[in-house]
Amino acid sequence: MIAKENPTIDFSNYVVKGALRNYAYDGQSESSRAQYIFDLYSLSDKKDKIRKAILKGLANEQEDTWSLTHLFDLAKLFAQQGDQEMKNAIYDRFCNNPIEGSDWVGYSEILELDGLQGLIYIAEKFGKFIEQNPDDWQDDWILRYFQEENPDLEVTKVLDNLAKENKHIRMYLDNIKRTKESQEKHKTKPIIYKDIIDEVLNSKPYLSFKRRHDLTESEIKIIAQRLVKEKHKKAQEKLLFVFTYH
C-alpha cells in the first residue's frame, strides 16, 4: 500500500534486501514471502536492478537455508511469467554447491514448473551428485510427495524404466534402496508396557506425541485416579503432564 501510494519514491534497495534474505522468525514453519516481494518488484521502476540481484543471490547464497528457499520460490514466480533465464537459474542451482544438509532446496519449484520432467531432472541430478559423493544418502520422500500429488502416474515404474538406460537415475534409486534397508536394520523395536500407568511413568519422553492425543477415556480416568493417590513428585509430574493435552 505504501509503495502504491508513493510511486515517486525508490524502494528498490529495500525490495532487494527483502528478496535476498528471509526475514521470517521461523523460516521452516512460516509461509512464503515470495509473492509479497514479487508484488513490490512489479510496482518498482527499478525492475532490472531487483531481478539481477535475485539471480545473483540464487546463484551465490551459501549461509542460510531459508533465504535460499525464499530465493527459489521468488525465482519460480518469474519463471511462471515466462522468464527463461530465471527458470534456467533454478535448474542450475539445484543440488549445485548445496548448503550442508539442504541439498533438497529447490525441488518443489522444479516440480511445480515441470512436473514429471522436473522429477526426472531431479533424479538424474541427485545421481550425478552421488557419483561424486558416494557417502551421500537419499530417501524416497521426494518421490512419495510427487506420487501423492500425481496419483494417476506410476512414478517408481517410470523411473525404474528410465534407470535401465540412465546410470545416474539408477544410482539415485539404488541409493534410496540402500537408505531404506539401513533404516529398517536400525529401526528401534517398540517397547511393550504392562499397562497405561507403566507407559506414562516409563516412556522417554513421557508419552510419544501421537499417544498423548490417542488416549482413551478409560486410560485418562486410570491416569487421573493414580495421580490423586501418587506420593512421589517425579511420578506426579509425569502423570500430570498427560493433562496438558486432556
Image (cartoon, grey):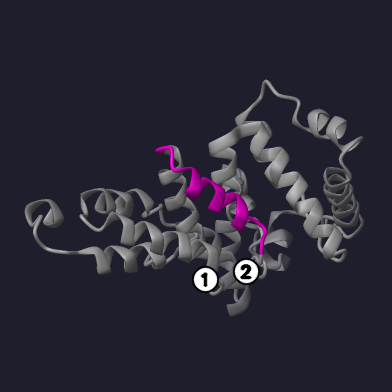
Q: Nearer the viewer, residue 178 or 168?
A: 168
Is residue 83 shown in magenta? yes
Residue under circle 1?
64
Residue under circle 2?
99
Contact (Cβ within 8 Å) of mark 1 with mark 2: yes
x, y (%) of residue 192? Answer: 83, 55
User: Left or right: 231 with respect to 183?
Assistant: left
Residue at 66% across, 70% down: 100
Q: Amino acid at mark 2?
A: Ile
Residue 230 in sight here? no
Residue at 90% across, 52% down: 178
Q: Is residue 53 above or below residue 169?
A: below
x, y (%) of residue 133? Answer: 83, 65
x, y (%) of residue 24? Answer: 38, 64
Q: Is residue 197 above or below residue 73?
A: below
Which region of the structure is painted magenta? 81-96
